[in-house]
């Protein structure tokens, strides 16, 4: 029996659906033993190939990190600086590969602009890594403890953020250690934040997240949970809260 159950889904925001634009969020995840590796990416609405960029970055980063863990590298045990260097190496290689994709398409790296929020964790410890918007929340086993939350990093203006594909990506990369036993980890794109996060982003919003997680823990299989999560994100009631694409990745202790 694995130590995690992972559920994930994306839904196209109303503003995109009304214009016939596909969802520009993406996610990827892997389990290597009891190590969870997961990423959520949000493609920039202004970039013409952002959907492809988000998908490429999510898949590439998760594949590379899971390969390193599979080869015996104990990434969740690394210190903050060591973990940051390891993740930066993986992101740098993903950027280089995406640059080749862009060159073949006669495009630039900025045409594939995407944010990134990810996690590498065991049930006991780990770290978030983050460039741009989106949120990562580590839910401690001790329900009275303060959760570790990787918050979005935005620019000077309200709608400005940072991208993996940007020229200053390395200095925008931030890492947040998780040093307490976990009952769950949640990653989300910024479109899900208005209803999944509490006021001031102090934690998950219980009236929404508690019943969702309770349901997911009770489903027979992850496919069933993924379908239910997708239907929840695509509920027309969310259109009154946000017009953005919405992605939730929820990893719960089995």
Image (spheres, rainbow, N blue to C red):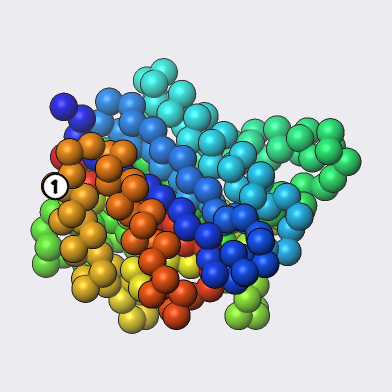
The percent position of residue 11, horizontal first and vertical second, equals 47, 57
Residue at (79% x, 40% y) in the render:
102
Q: Is residue 8 above or below residue 104?
A: below
Give the crowd class for mark 1: few <14, some 14-19, many >=20 residues within 10 Å. few
The percent position of residue 10, horizontal first and vertical second, equals 46, 53
Q: Is residue 198 left or right of residue 17?
A: left
Residue at (38% x, 75% y) in the render:
237
Q: Viewer-proximal residue, 87 or 96? A: 96
Number of numbered discs on residues: 1
Q: Is residue 72 left or right of residue 152?
A: left
Q: Is residue 80 left or right of residue 98?
A: left
Residue 198 visible here: yes
The percent position of residue 143, horizontal first and vertical second, equals 12, 63
Q: Is residue 211 left or right of residue 38?
A: left
The residue tagged 1 is 218
Residue at (54% x, 42% y) in the render:
58
Looking at the rendered image, the quarter that the C terminus falls into is: top left
For label 1, the SS is helix
Q: Viewer-proximal residue, 62 or 180? A: 62
Q: Quadrant of residue 18?
A: bottom right
Q: Is residue 40 above or below residue 56?
A: below
The percent position of residue 245, horizontal first and vertical second, equals 52, 63
């Amino acid at each position: 029996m694995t130590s995690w159950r992972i559920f994930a889904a994306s839904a196209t925001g109303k503003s995109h659906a009304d214009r016939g634009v596909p969802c520009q969020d993406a996610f990827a995840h892997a389990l290597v033993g009891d190590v969870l590796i997961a990423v959520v990416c949000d493609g920039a609405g202004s970039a013409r190939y952002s959907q492809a960029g988000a998908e490429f970055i999510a898949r590439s980063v998760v594949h590379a990190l899971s390969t390193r863990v599979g080869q015996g590298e104990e990434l969740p045990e690394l210190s903050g600086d060591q973990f940051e260097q390891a993740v930066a190496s993986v992101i740098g290689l993903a950027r280089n590969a995406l640059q080749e994709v862009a060159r073949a398409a006669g495009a630039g790296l900025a045409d594939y602009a995407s944010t990134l929020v990810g996690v590498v964790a065991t049930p006991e410890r780990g770290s978030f890594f983050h460039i741009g918007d989106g949120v990562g929340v580590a839910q401690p086993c001790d329900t009275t403890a303060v959760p570790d939350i990787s918050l979005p990093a935005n620019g000077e203006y309200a709608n400005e953020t940072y991208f993996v594909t940007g020229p200053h990506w390395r200095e925008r990369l931030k890492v947040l250690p998780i040093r307490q036993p976990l009952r769950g980890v949640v990653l989300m794109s910024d479109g899900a934040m208005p209803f999944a996060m509490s006021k001031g982003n102090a934690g998950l919003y219980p009236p929404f997240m508690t019943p969702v997680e309770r349901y997911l823990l009770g489903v027979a299989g992850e496919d069933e949970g993924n379908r239910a999560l997708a239907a929840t994100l695509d509920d027309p009631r969310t259109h009154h809260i946000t017009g953005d694409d919405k992605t939730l990745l929820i990893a719960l202790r089995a």
